[in-house]
Image (spheres, helix red, strand yellow):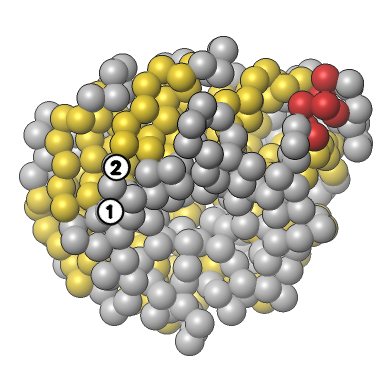
Amino acid sequence: MRLLKTMLHGSVLVTALLPGPASGQDGTQSVATTAPADAWPQFRGNPSLTGVSDATLPAELTLLWTYTADEAIDSSAAIADGTVYVGTYAGTLIALDLATGEERWTYTTGDLGIGESSPAVAGDLVFIGDLAGVFHAVDTKTGTARWTFETLGEIKSSPVIIGDRVLIGSYDGYLYGLAVADGALLWKYETLNYVHATPAIWDGVAYFGGCDELFHGVRISDGAEVLSLSAGAYTAASPVIVDGKVFFGTFDNEVLGIDLATQELLWHYEHPRRHFPFYSSALAVDGMIVIGGRDKMLHAIDAQTGESRWTFTTRARVDSSPATSGGRVYAGSSDGRLYVLDLATGDKLWEFDTAAPLVASPAIAEGRLIIGSEDGIVYCFG
């Protein structure tokens, strides 16, 4: 079914774009599309969710340290000010020293634990959601709660911080806009099903695909809907935005590219033989979209044409979202291996076997790569 393509080609929108406030007001300022060399402050590294780092990693990675946590880790790490933050299924938010792996503090969210929600850091606060539906703002120095906000469903979406507000999705069907300072509710936007994906930010608007099979655009300043399109399929993957184009995979076994200015479908990609859902969030770099599939493959797609550049086959599904630095792709697989591939060709350069599935995504900063595993071990490579 190609509902998105039909609607876009027919110029049919559920809602039209609305004018927003001037740039720089209420979180509408331009956002970074790469993570700085010294930080990876949120899921996918930056609010555009590109998965790109300015850091330089060694040509040959070495395991520098490990940390054994109290439960499985699906939460992708954040890195800021020399500290690694990661959540576990035991409900523990852990702060580790990036250089040594030593524990700085732990914070307990609750009995239901932390799933795929990944930390985001701004100033002296680190934010994370838990499976009880509670959103936490924790002091980065002391590891104590500054404030919490309760939703009515589990939180698997990851927070995104824009200016003075933080955005978080919940399985209660809402995307929330909260004040960073005190957690005050500024607005909430209702969808027709779970909000699983993390929103990507472009020009003052938060864009995300929903479990309601719609692709949403929500103005950050006031929570107004500015775009709602049929995606034609259940969408759990977070989108990536680059140069006003958005790309994301769906459970209809395809990857879509959309021009946000015209709301036109640029292309849709589907492997000619292997038809499996895309749960991984895409990487966008150097004119390519790289995404993991439940077909056990990493797919590199030309961002202009939607044609395949290369594929790489692992031994199990790839729900982990790839990251890049220095012309290399870093990706985890449920086969337990961390892979390093050449970005241009997809050739394997290196792999490391953790012996447990890797669902979390790599985080890169200060010449180091951090990833957690399903057996509760945090790995640091450099």
Image location (x, y in percent) of residue 157: 58, 58
Which residue lies at the image location 38% right of the left edge and 56% below the top edge?
A: 359
Return the residue nearer the eye: 209 or 301: 301
Whether residue 190 is visible to the viewer of this picture, yes or no, is yes
What amino acid does circle 2 point to? Thr
Q: Is residue 258 left or right of residue 39?
A: right
The label on residue 314 is 2
Q: Quadrant of the N terminus?
A: top right
Q: Examine the rendered structure and indicate whether residue 37 appears above or below residue 336.
A: above
Which residue lies at the image location 21% right of the left edge and 43% below the top edge?
A: 368
Label 1: state its secondary structure: loop
Whether residue 143 is visible to the viewer of this picture, yes or no, is no
- For the residues marked 2 and 1, what is the alpha-carbon distance in whole angstroms? 7 Å
Which residue lies at the image location 29% right of the left edge and 18% below the top edge?
A: 345
Q: Is residue 267 left or right of residue 112?
A: right
What amino acid does circle 1 point to? Asp
